[in-house]
């Protein structure tokens, strides 16, 4: 196989689990020779934003660092940015109370908070619809490790998938998770998670990260977002991103998780933590952390 200077790309669509519209599935095959079976699959939510980054990271590290060859699968919407924000919220979150939604102010409007609540339908779509479709098209992945990566609201979704169905993936990369959603309601899933985890014959590997600067207050907000500086600063304070990620990792350990790595990337904010999480999270997920 010739050395590739860019990741491959194949795309197809699948019906959205709601029955309305279709999702765009993007797939990057390994850039280096892969085994004949059990090739890992990295599933990336927010594919419109993060698939390209994940695919290029996979190509680069597997080409030059003896990193295990793996497929990258992204789920996207093929929508403009404003619509993307709302559609991802619909799929990646649990329902939000009226009071919690009101507390978000303009941020809730910008991300379509009122449309949230589809996470419980989106997870079985990944495991029961998308995964067989990938295995049919790429048979070498059928028995390979399954890894889920989510960042921000995607990180919230990855945390929910872990707590609700810890057997749904072999590894979870929970990056800068928006645990604040619905007043940190996701933490209420921890007691049931402890029981579900104890029933497993093999635990998943779990990587929880955050940018160490995510609690720094912004001095400005992007134009056109519909959010005031005061609202943005209040959200940063209330979200407690750095503290909450650490506390979540501690709670997972308290529930009995053994294969867990938590890190606050020293110089990173909410955006720049995403590529660091892909690189270091995949290393941990694939057992290359030693």
Image: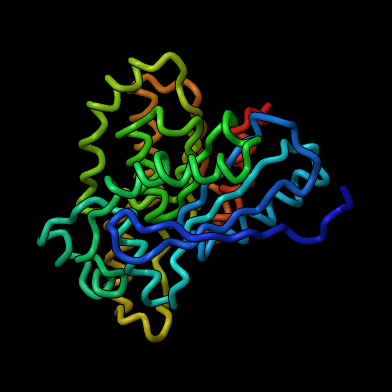
Q: Relative to 48, is 121 on the left or the right? A: left
Q: x, y percentage for residue 141?
A: 61, 36
Look at the picture and state if 14 lies above or below 35.
Answer: below
Q: Relative to 12, is 60 on the left or the right? A: right
Displayed quadrant of residue 221:
bottom left
Q: Is residue 270 visible?
A: no
Residue furthest toward the left? 98
Look at the picture and state if 112 lies above or below 139.
Answer: below
Where is the C terminus found, in terms of image quarters? Answer: top right
| Residue at the image point whose x is 44% and y is 51% from the top | 176
Q: x, y percentage for residue 20?
A: 30, 64
Residue furthest toward the front? 136
| Residue at the image point whose x is 72% and y is 36% from the top | 68
Displayed quadrant of residue 9:
bottom right
Residue furthest toward the right? 2
| Residue at the image point whose x is 63% and y is 28% from the top | 287
Q: x, y percentage for residue 175?
A: 47, 48
Q: Is residue 101 visible?
A: yes
Q: x, y percentage for residue 201?
A: 43, 14
Q: How is the image coloured?
A: rainbow
Look at the picture and state if 215 lies above or below 104.
Answer: above
Residue furthest toward the bottom? 224
Displayed quadrant of residue 289:
top right
Camera-side residue of 83 and 197: 83
């Amino acid at each position: 196989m010739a050395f590739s200077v860019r990741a491959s790309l194949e795309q197809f669509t699948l019906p959205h689990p709601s029955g309305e519209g279709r999702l765009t599935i993007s797939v990057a095959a390994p850039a280096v020779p892969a085994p004949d079976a059990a090739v890992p699959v990295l599933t990336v939510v927010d594919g419109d934003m993060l698939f390209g980054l994940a695919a290029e990271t996979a190509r680069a590290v597997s080409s030059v660092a003896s990193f295990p060859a793996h497929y990258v699968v992204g789920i996207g919407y093929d929508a403009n940015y404003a619509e993307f924000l709302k559609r991802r919220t619909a799929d990646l979150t649990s329902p939000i109370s009226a009071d919690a939604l009101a507390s978000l102010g303009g941020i809730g409007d910008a991300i379509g908070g009122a449309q949230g609540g589809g996470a419980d339908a989106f997870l079985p779509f990944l495991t029961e619809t998308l995964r067989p479709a990938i295995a049919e098209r790429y048979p070498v992945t059928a028995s390979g490790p399954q890894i889920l990566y989510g960042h921000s609201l995607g990180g919230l979704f990855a945390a929910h998938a872990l707590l609700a169905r810890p057997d749904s993936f072999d590894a979870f990369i929970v990056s800068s998770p928006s645990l604040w959603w619905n007043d940190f309601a996701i933490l209420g899933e921890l007691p049931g998670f402890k029981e579900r985890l104890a029933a497993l014959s093999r635990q998943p590997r779990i990587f929880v990260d955050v940018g160490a600067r995510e609690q720094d207050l912004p001095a400005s907000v992007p134009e056109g977002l519909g959010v005031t500086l005061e609202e943005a600063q209040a959200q940063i304070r209330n979200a407690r991103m750095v503290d909450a990620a650490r506390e979540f990792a501690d709670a997972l350990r308290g529930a009995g998780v053994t294969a867990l790595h938590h890190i606050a990337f020293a110089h990173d904010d909410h955006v720049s933590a995403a590529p660091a999480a892909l690189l270091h999270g995949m290393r941990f997920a694939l057992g290359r952390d030693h």
